Amino acid sequence: MLGLFDSGLGGLTVLQRLRERLPQQDIIFFADQLHVPYGDRTPGELVELLRANVEFLDARAVDAIVMACNTSCATAAREGWPVTKAPILDLIESAAIAVESAGYQRIGVVATAATTATRAYTQKITSRISRAHVFEVAAPALVPLVEAGKLVGEEPRAAVAAVCAQLPPDLDAVLLACTHYPLLDAHFAAALGEGVARIDPAIVHAERAAAIAAHEGFAPGTGSITCITSGDPERFRLAVTNVLGKLPEITFER
């Protein structure tokens, strides 16, 4: 069984990619919506949330923790990872691998304020690509829009356009460095235009998870998906259904 957590609905974008690559693996997803957004929280708070969420999944005896929260990964890059029984797959590492594989040199990174404050993306990418130029931009308005279900219309379009306007015009690619942001991908596509690639790190992340599952011999399950929130369970159920559809393999726990 694979474990994922995020501050909220963004982790569903990672869950989708995992389901594509590992349809028989059981998955447990925890959305810490009681504390969303993480991007506005202090470093000390983020360390405590990271530790608590990892302990929650470890207690469920997951085979691996596939990180679905960029802000928590950035926190770990600065403060260190908690000790766990299960191996942890770092989402920022997956993003850097995606950039390196594509050969991009000028990369924009759109992330939460807490993530950009650590410069974790710049450090990870330049450690792999010495001549890379990385431009990080914080986008604090986007996670609340996704959590409120505002995925289409003028408000999210304008918010994404305002963020993209802060990036240099001559980029090779832009990393959607918060798992909420792929849910706004159509707006990023419109704002950036056809000449700039958009990278969802979850694609490489799922490939790496599949490789680990094969290497470690994780036993296949029934393909079940268990979703849990620390927030409002009914709102969460509706939001998950809106993103993933009514899948019979999904169950909700309180």
Image (tube, grey):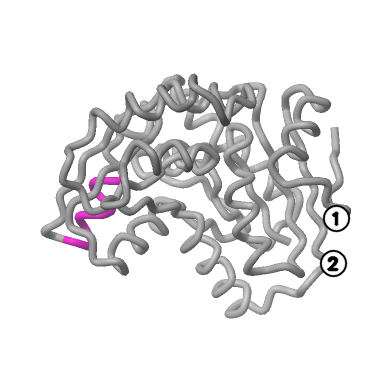
Q: Residue at x 57, y 30 (%)?
A: 151
**What residue is at 77 percent from the left and 46 percent from the top?**
245
Q: Nearer the viewer, residue 127 or 203?
A: 203
Identify the main secondary structure in magenta: helix
Residue 64: horizontal and vertical position, in percent? 62, 60
Residue on which the image places disc 2: 222
Up-down: is 106 above or below 204? above
Q: Name the N-terminal-most of marks 1 and 2.
A: 2
Q: Nearer the viewer, residue 159 or 216?
A: 159
Q: Residue at x 21, y 40 (%)?
A: 135
Q: Quadrant of the N terminus?
A: bottom right
Quadrant containing the C terminus in the rendered view? top right
Rendering coords of residue 179 (x, y %): 51, 42
Looking at this view, is 26 or 171 the one in front? 171
Q: Which mark is residue 249?
A: 1
Q: Nearer the viewer, residue 242 or 230?
A: 242
Identify the magenta region.
121-129
How many callouts does the rendering have?
A: 2
